[in-house]
Amino acid sequence: MDTIQVALAERAAEEQRHHGKALFFYVWGALLLMTAIEVYLTYQNMQPAKMLTILMGLSLIKAALIIGYFMHLKYEVSRMKWLTMCSVVACLILMTIFFFPDAFRILYLGVK
Amino acid sequence: MADSAVHDIPSVYEPSLFGTYSKKIGMWLFLLSDSLTFGALLYAYSYGRISTAGWPTPFHSESIINATIMTAFLLTSSLTMVLAVRASVHGDASGQRLWLLATMLCGTGFIVLHGREWSNLIAEGLTLPMFPKVPGHEAAIEFSNVSKLVPQFGATFFTLTGMHMLHVTLGVIYLGVVALRKKFIPILLVLWLVAWLGTPVYSPFHYGAHVLLIAAIVCTVILWLKPKVYDSSDVEVAGLYWHFVDLVWMFIFPLVYLMSAKIL
């Protein structure tokens, strides 16, 4: 692909990113709705583990909407998406692997 | 021969490997590194919660309502930010400025509500040893017990939310510079004086207000060294930062507030 084609592709992507306003309002509404659901669930006396799972699930969906639509990552080229998402997810998985088993181990050992 | 010679010469600017301009890639790389900072703080909070028996749930419904309104402010600011980017791409300068100012307004609302909540918690006894005591205010036993028995809670709570509040403050300043350029500096100095002189000496915000003074000096130097009219790419890059701040709050709000809500 030569420079002109790349420029045209970038221009097309740029135009695609900024189409109608309506989509942004839908995303905003969905984010507010999910926030309201989270607050509602807080007062439903659920088991903490179950509640945490649901809240984190909703947070991940909200994060995906923000990154995809508001930050326009959905419309970037594949390389950009993979570079950004894979690197950060890999680091967070490593943190999870190293931190959490240790935190549970302390609890089970009965350290007060 | 002449044609092949022309075609063999590489162009001065090679196409970007990631299909976009370098400023945006730079901001994405910064945000990736910053996400690890917040990731580490969120993990530290979660680690403390898991490994500490009797983790407190100090947030009454007033705190939850306050945090929910703060969340709505941030989500709305993301909408106005994306509309500012859209206006800038379409060459609508006044629309761009208007939406940027609306974003700043929502961000400022978030900071004010958060500051008020911090002040209330500190006054009621949920505090850190480094914060001065509030004179003439009786600490609630419930909150002072939290500070004494589970100091990890206050330490992780104030670090995490304080770091986020700092990011929001810097975001508002960033947007102010993009929207108003040099005109924003005197406004920033006025805000610094109001925040500094308008808060009591025992408040952490009395000293925290100096962040605004430091930011004003840094912005003055930047605008003096490189005066320019910010174009749509600058607005989009500023937007990336702003949305990231919103994104981080989407994890802080449920993890810190909702999971520690006091259910009566």
Image: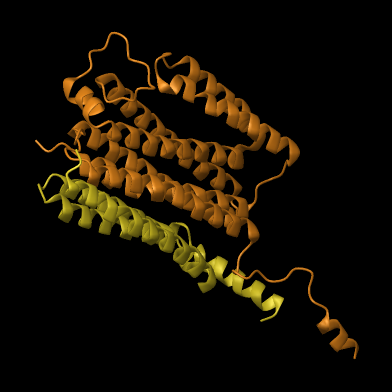
Residue located at (42% from left, 22% from top): B204
Counting from the top left corner in percent of width and height, residue B64 is at 23, 37
Single out the residue that lies furthest toward the bottom: B1
Tell which of B136 and B244 is nearer to you.
B136
Counting from the top left corner in percent of width and height, residue B224 is at 73, 35
Above or below residue A98? Residue A110 is above
Q: Colour of chain A?
A: yellow
Q: Describe the colour scheme in one phrase.
A: by chain
Q: How many numbered dots are placed on residues in this image? A: 0
Q: Which chain is orange?
A: B
Give the quadrant of the C terminus of chain B. Answer: top left
Residue B43 in sight here? yes
Residue located at (29% from left, 38% from top): B67
Tell which of B47 and A67 is nearer to you.
B47
Quick check: A94 left or right of A102? right
Quadrant of the rendered structure where residue B222 is? top right
Residue located at (42% from left, 63% from top): A90
Residue located at (60% from left, 38% from top): B177
Above or below residue B37? Residue B17 is below
Give the quadrant of the N terminus of chain B. Answer: bottom right
Residue B243 in sight here? no
Quick check: B151 left or right of B57? right
Counting from the top left corner in percent of width and height, residue B128 is at 34, 25
Above or below residue B30? Residue B64 is above
Quick check: B137 left or right of B36? left
Single out the residue that lies furthest toward the right: B2
Counting from the top left corner in percent of width and height, residue B8 is at 82, 83
Above or below residue A46? Residue B186 is above
